[in-house]
Image (spheres, rainbow, N blue to C red):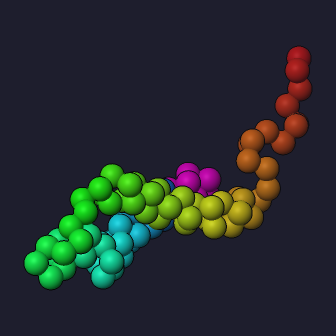
Amino acid sequence: MNRSAVTCGGCVLSVAGALAATALWLTSPRTRIHLGHGFEDEGLDLSVLVTELPLVFLAGALLPVLVYAPLARLLTGGSGSGNDGSEGDG
């Protein structure tokens, strides 16, 4: 398999994971209460946008990559350096 196709697949999974994690976080009942959808704005706490949202986004982006990296290494057939030691110094 072509290395650039594998790399592109990892990037696509990373973006999809980040967007899916953010969408799931935004639709959770706990987050909806913090963003003002509680009874008479009960529990309105916009600090979750600064504290939780970046962590959810990063976790959603990194988790698919951490799972995909070993698979990509297997698909491309081994070492990540691309140097198989067959080139001489002189």
Taking 74 as reference, is 24 above or below it? Answer: below
Q: Residue at x 25, y 76 (%)?
A: 33
Give the farthest residue toward the left: 40
Instruction: Say which residue appears at 72% left-offset and 59% top-offset.
Output: 73
**Residue 76 falls in image quadrant:** bottom right
Extent of the magenta region: 1-8
Q: Position of residue 49 (x, y in %)?
A: 30, 57
In screen coordinates, is 9 left or right of 54? right
Q: Is residue 4 magenta?
A: yes
Quadrant housing the C terminus: top right
Nearer-the-camera pick, 58 or 7: 58
- Residues 87 and 22: in front is 22
Q: Is residue 48 magenta?
A: no
Locate residue 82, reporting x and y percent.
Answer: 74, 42
The image quarter in which residue 25 lies: bottom left
Picture coordinates of residue 23, whole percent (x, y):
32, 72
Res 30 seen here: yes
Q: Residue at x 62, y 53 (%)?
A: 3
Q: Quadrant of residue 6?
A: bottom right
Q: Nearer the viewer, residue 29 or 7?
A: 29
- Left or right? Give the position of 75 relative to 86: left
